[in-house]
Amino acid sequence: MNPETSFPISVLFVDDEPSMGDIARIFLEEQLGGCVVTQVTDGIIALERIQSHNYDVIVADYEMPGLDGLQLLRTLRNAGDNTPFLVCTGKSRHEVVIEALNAGADFYLQKGEDPLILFTEMKQMIVQAVTRRRSEKALANSRNLLEEIIDFLPDATLAVDLSHNIIAWNRIMEDLTGIPSDSVLFKRQNFSDYCIRHPGVSSLIEHIMILGEQTTSTSYNPGIENRIITEEYRGLVGEDETDERYYRIMVSPILNSDMQKVGFIGSVRDITAQKRSEYALLESRENFRALVENNTDIVMRFDVNGRHLYVNPAVDPYIPFHPEHLIGKTYKDLLSSSRMATDWDNLIQKAISTGNQQEADISFKISKEIVTLNWRLFPEFDMDGNIRSVLSISRDITYQREFEQEKHALLEQIQRNLGEFAILNDGIRNPLAVITGWLSIMDLQEKECSTLMHQIRQIDEMITKLDRRWVESEKVLGFLRRHFAIQACKPTEYFE
């Protein structure tokens, strides 16, 4: 059973002859079935019942004392009540039929002598009227629902029929244009005639209309994705004439049940923030790439399996093949039997498993030279906090390490020199003490003794000054050791 014409149908039967109501109940409820009949004998009572009950259909006699059928019909229609209405009469005057239909009756039925024929025909009219009214109501509900959906879409949306009349104009479109929907609905529009809120919006709307005309229906390929036209629009549509905005326009044909185009629907979304973010991201990437591509340090990126995702040109002098050969490979793939490859892959996996930065100094041969790199690895996380890749930066510290080693050797030499200097100082003081002792016991003239003692004191003063300089030199050496001595750990060496 069609839900739009579901039974039983509630019927209000209005006739001043009670016997007619009884006959109607017998035929419509019992013999023909599908109806529930409520009988009243005049129009006044009918109005009271209608105000307190809902009926699917009203059947009223044309001539009744007081409020007759036609007056009841006009009263209901003037009050906005569109309940299906059948007018019955024993008269067959043509003007009565016209008057009933003009007043809003759904059907006019002339009474006959055979009640079975009369009520069979009445039942058909009742079902037809109720079905039509329910269908109209369902259609109206569908249209209202569609209008509500369109009105609350987040995008500015309009719909146009084939005569270029606007048939939908939602609130976001009102906000965008400053034009209320009641000013444009069901009218053929020329948007250049309107004072639109923002400069350039009229051009945007006209572009939607142009794209709408280009939409087509394809009966051989009816997929909606094949009928949508999507374009991006760029223009000065803000209050500030320098405020450039970006919009994404989507239009699609409106098709009837025969897949024929009867209009089109278009929506426009402000994607300015998205586009600006995309441009900013693109610029950031370009800046990053320019920085990395020209960096003297080796920059690499690995996936969670240790495969190379990116390498910059700085790696070229350190490998015997083109840098692109690294992409998609682990070090084990490149150097399958090498302990160096295993250690390097393990260090990458350690950065992934721990989520912490890793660092190592590694030395290996290139041709006949030994190169030392400081290798640092940084885990990179996604929005959920999961590691998605590892960024590595390698710096050639070969000359720096050689310098450190030379510096260390020089500091050790200074240390040895200062030690020997202290020994020499002590070695000079001891003979002076012996000489001084001998002078005290030798029988020398006073002048000669005075001259020798003067020379001894001068030598002692020089040694004292050297002692002070030795102490100062030790302090300087300590400072050099604290601030310039080798700090890095010994590199892992690979000389296979």
Image (spheres, helix red, strand yellow):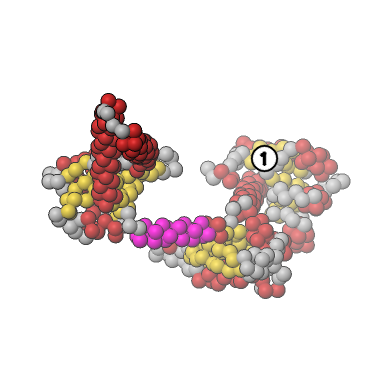
Q: Which residue lies under the disc numbered 1?
A: 10
- Report the magenta stretch's main SS: helix
Q: How many marks?
A: 1
**Residue 61 locus on image (x, y percent):** 77, 48
Query: In percent of the image, x 85 and y 47: which residue is there?
Result: 67
Mark 1, secondary structure of its residue: strand
Q: In the depicted view, which residue is nearer to us: 65 or 190?
A: 190
108 sits to left or right of 292: right
413 lies left or right of 90: left
Q: Does residue 293 belong to the magenta stretch? A: yes
Question: Which of the two residues, 385 or 117, is positioned nearer the viewer here?
Answer: 385
Residue sitting nearer the eye, 129 or 368: 368
* Range of magenta residues: 275-294
In the current view of this chain or complex, which residue is farthest to the right? 66
Q: Counting other residues with Cα less than 10 Å from the Cα at mark 1, is it few (<14), some (14-19), or many (20 or more)? A: some
Q: Position of residue 348 (x, y in %)?
A: 28, 42
Q: Please say if 446 is above or below 379.
A: above
